[in-house]
Image: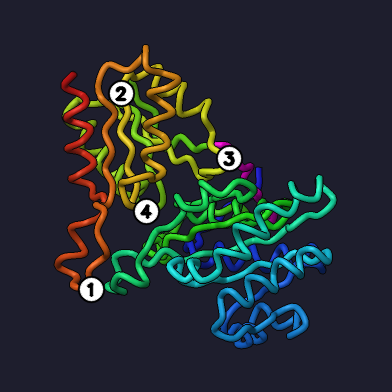
Amino acid sequence: MSETRELSYAEAIHEAQILEMGRDASVILIGEDIHGLTLGPYAEFGPERLWSAPISESGFTGMAVGAALTGLRPIVDLLISSLLYVAMDPLVNQAGKLRAMTGGQAKVPAVFRCGLWHGSSYAAQHSDRPYPLFMNSPGLKVAIPATPADAKGLLQTAVRDDDPVMIFEDRNLAHERGPVCEGDAPVPFGQARVHREGSDVTLVAIASAVREALAAADDLAREGISVEVIDPRTLVPLDRETLLGSVRRTGRLVVADPAHRTCGAAAEIAALAAEEAFDALRAPVARVTTPDVPIPFSPALESKLYPSQQGIADAVRRVARY
């Protein structure tokens, strides 16, 4: 097994990019004002592989799709996920569909890094968690790392994938530290991570909700409630077998997701359990999500919206009573 050392979530992302650029000369970086990366650890790659783009998400996203079609493997830094809305056409209509529309003749091996800035008082136009939109766009893969090790491993896997991959990076975790393997450490897509085994309730958590879910599970264990905490890691493809296997063992399911409630990832996972493990359920499925409201600027108002340790623990207690 590779040796590990402590890295932050943000450091792990940079390590993955540097490793992949060193491994494959076709890997390039595209983003706004990234010319500063020509200094420091990226200096060896030079401006021909660090493409600094103007503030035009639609423009440089479309450019990345074109670059991928020529054989390059762009990593695109979209910085703030809310800005994806102005890049929907190249992402959904081009990147996601060209392989199918050409009968497999065209490939779009591009990675789109999308920052989730909720909880930062960035207000409504910069605080969205729009990954459910892209779960509903066939041809795109969707990954959401919740630990430094997964931030590195999922990004490495994404760069090597011949399909377009959207990685949503929860910036609330940027300074979280954890063990990360030295060298190559790709994490397979479609393989959930069981952070904690349990027998009473299955708790599926996404992005920064994983941290809150693990803290809640610790509290609940002291009350005699055994909680299994699972991070899907990728929403497309989704590890249905691990999720359903856990629900069939525990008979109860809670999903914690910092995205909005309606048509979200939590709704999809709840529907999966209802359709394919209904006979095992001993309680209604519970969702702990962000309400369907624009995100306010006020820290006092915003801080109450997202799944919290207390809110998750309360939901688990409710289903555990059945």
Quadrant including the C terminus? top left
Residue name at image x 65 percent, y 54 percent: 96
Residue name at image x 63 percent, y 65 percent: 90
- Residue 3: x percent and y percent? 62, 50
- Per the rendered image, the range of residues in magenta is 183-191
**Magenta-colored stretch includes residue 168:** no
The residue under label 2 is 252
* Front residue of this view, candidates 178 and 83: 83
Q: CA distance from mark 2 to mark 1?
A: 36 Å
The residue under label 4 is 208
Name the amino acid type tagged 2.
Arg
The residue under label 1 is 297
- Residue 163: x percent and y percent? 70, 51
- Residue 229: x percent and y percent? 37, 35
Total label count?
4
Q: Residue furthest top?
A: 279
**Magenta-colored stretch includes residue 188:** yes
Residue 106 vs residue 140: left or right? Answer: right
Residue name at image x 35 percent, y 28 percent: 202
Q: Element at badge 3?
A: loop
Residue name at image x 83 percent, y 66 percent: 70
Residue 94 vs residue 292: left or right? Answer: right
Q: CA distance from mark 4 to mark 3?
A: 20 Å
The residue under label 3 is 237
Q: Element at badge 2?
A: loop
Q: Main secondary structure of the magenta part?
A: loop
- Label 3 neighbour load within 10 Å: few <14, some 14-19, many 20+: some
* Front residue of this view, candidates 16 and 108: 108
